[in-house]
Image (tube, coloured by chain):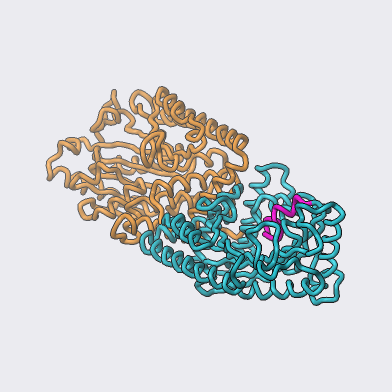
Chain colours: A cyan, B orange
Amino acid sequence: MANWFEVNDDESKVVISSRIRLARNLIDYPFPNKMKEEESKEVLQKAKDVIVNGNTVLKDDFKYYKMQDCDEVEKGMLLEKHLISREIMENSNSGVLIKNDESVSVMINEEDHIRIQTIFPGFKLNEAFDLADKIDDVLEEQLDYAYDERLGFLTSCPTNIGTGLRASIMVHLPALVELGYIDGVLKAANQLGLAVRGIYGENSKALGNIFQISNQLTLGRKEQEIIGNIMGIAKQIIDKELEARDVLKKEKGIRFEDRVYRSLGILKSSRIIDTKEAMNHLSNVKLGIEMNFIEEISTRIIDKLMIDIQPIHQISMYEAKNVVERDINRASHIRKTIELNTKNKE
Amino acid sequence: MANWFEVNDDESKVVISSRIRLARNLIDYPFPNKMKEEESKEVLQKAKDVIVNGNTVLKDDFKYYKMQDCDEVEKGMLLEKHLISREIMENSNSGVLIKNDESVSVMINEEDHIRIQTIFPGFKLNEAFDLADKIDDVLEEQLDYAYDERLGFLTSCPTNIGTGLRASIMVHLPALVELGYIDGVLKAANQLGLAVRGIYGENSKALGNIFQISNQLTLGRKEQEIIGNIMGIAKQIIDKELEARDVLKKEKGIRFEDRVYRSLGILKSSRIIDTKEAMNHLSNVKLGIEMNFIEEISTRIIDKLMIDIQPIHQISMYEAKNVVERDINRASHIRKTIELNTKNKE
């Protein structure tokens, strides 16, 4: 995640990243679930060629992965980094183009022929959309998109018809979870047309208190309206989370501070730890940094650890033979990463 | 505790300290609980003079504390350091002479007129007895002890008659506690004539897994026999504890190592901690050092912390106004002490 940098405004204390996904299909082919073998091979080749063998600015920055040629570990790692989806892993004749800095991935023959995804650190939905839009323009120059004047872009699943746009932000909501407000917030967001789900684990039981908020409607609105709507609601959720943090700080005082430091102490010293416990402590430490209790380490390192410690990353990094070994390697990886990235106190 | 040094043999991985207490009374006075005001003042003066104003080697090394002149905090601290008993705190006209290095205390007008106590780090009962014996000789030259040819030294409580000797060792038995063997061990020791009790808290619920093993019989045996007996049984308990540690290491493996390091991590990072939790983590860390997992800090520091964090020491050190403040100060004291005394890893 070479493009991740540190941001210090209030919104970035809650929003980890902003993501845009555009669904596109080619006019001359059935949707992927209806394609014949030969057709899917053609779509894969065509879409890939535009970027990899084309004459555009994108040429040098992307690496191509054919799903069939990736082993389970490679696929799992791309999944845990949110660069591919579960769907694409199961399709034969599917592939993904990934930008070197991992800010862009273009999936071919997922649920749709083409899915463009951009991801930015912090609360940067507009920036993420601008980049996705540019890549979309490059592709559109070479490919004939399935487009209906009245409906807009046609997609495999009707829920994506229109803009084909899914805008989402990944947010850290530990205080809303702790104070028990999270279910109410999720419900309200839902009623306003947004989908909210835990990234790791499910909904209010989300591991690491990390949630994804995204639009459900793609039809009948302009892209900028959809993004404006989600940003407006997201701002309210961010404010609620920040208020809840103040409440926690005021109500729990030293016990709150104690907890974030203990979590850091445990991460710095444990010898075996499972994903769930590690995510919980990482969430505490992240909160401790965001609330200026902890200064010796940056949120960037904690965000990266949250991905590193996912099961497949762990297997890949250390070739663990079983769950116990994986949990031992996880503890070791966390200890070393924190030690290497701890700033001197003085 | 300037005389505390580090010892690395196996016995000293279990035995924290060895203590000898000799009970003595003056022939011309009733026992303390029967003395008149005037008599108790005379006894206090006489006994004190032998050491403080006498012409012996002891003169310069001892400091005198009159109990009436000590406030509750001073008394509490001496008690938590095991330099005085609860009984002496309640007697008027009582006092204590304490050697500068805190290896010897002579209580005057406790349950008996005179109680000589020596304390050595490690498994050093013979050495502790030799020192107590020497101090006893100095006192006996100047004072007339109540002594019966047939019974031996006469004491206020019949359980001390004879040698007036109480030999005790303070032991750390975390593995026997964890494996559930401690009750059996305590019972067996009891049947062999020894008393075993938790130092902080009671018996098998002992805080910090620290126990005191001492003789119950004082009559009908020579001092060396009593000491030999307790040392023999203690050696068996030490062996059982060391065996239990091997079992724990073998059975729990990495989870055992994990626990001792997590305890160190928590002690290094907590912001509020009560005595019970702190004693538990200190016991784990002590075990971690004794089993050569942890090398960055010495048991001497952990042993000292176990006394420092007792309630009255905490109040004295930081003048805490309430329990919460005391628990905050305790956490801070532990953090700073460990930080100051951590050896460089490389």
Tell me which residue sits at (59%, 53%) in the image: A200
The answer to which image quadrant residue A239 occupies is: bottom left
On screen, residue A180 versus residue A210, left or right, reads: left
Whether residue B334 is visible to the viewer of this picture, yes or no, is no
The magenta segment: A79-91
The image quadrant where one finds the N terminus of chain A is: bottom right
Camera-nearest residue between A121 and A181? A181
Q: In x, y percent, where is residue B276?
A: 40, 46
Whether residue B284 is visible to the viewer of this picture, yes or no, is yes
On screen, residue B326 versus residue A285, left or right, reads: left
Tell me which residue sits at (44%, 51%) in the image: B304
The image quadrant where one finds the C terminus of chain A is: bottom right
Magenta includes A88?
yes
Q: In x, y percent, where is residue B293?
A: 60, 47
On screen, residue A152 versus residue B12, left or right, reads: right
Tell me which residue sits at (15%, 39%) in the image: B35
Q: In x, y percent, where is residue A33?
A: 75, 52
Magenta includes B206?
no
The answer to which image quadrant residue B154 occupies is: top left
Q: In x, y percent, where is residue B129?
A: 41, 38
Camera-nearest residue between A190 and B150? A190
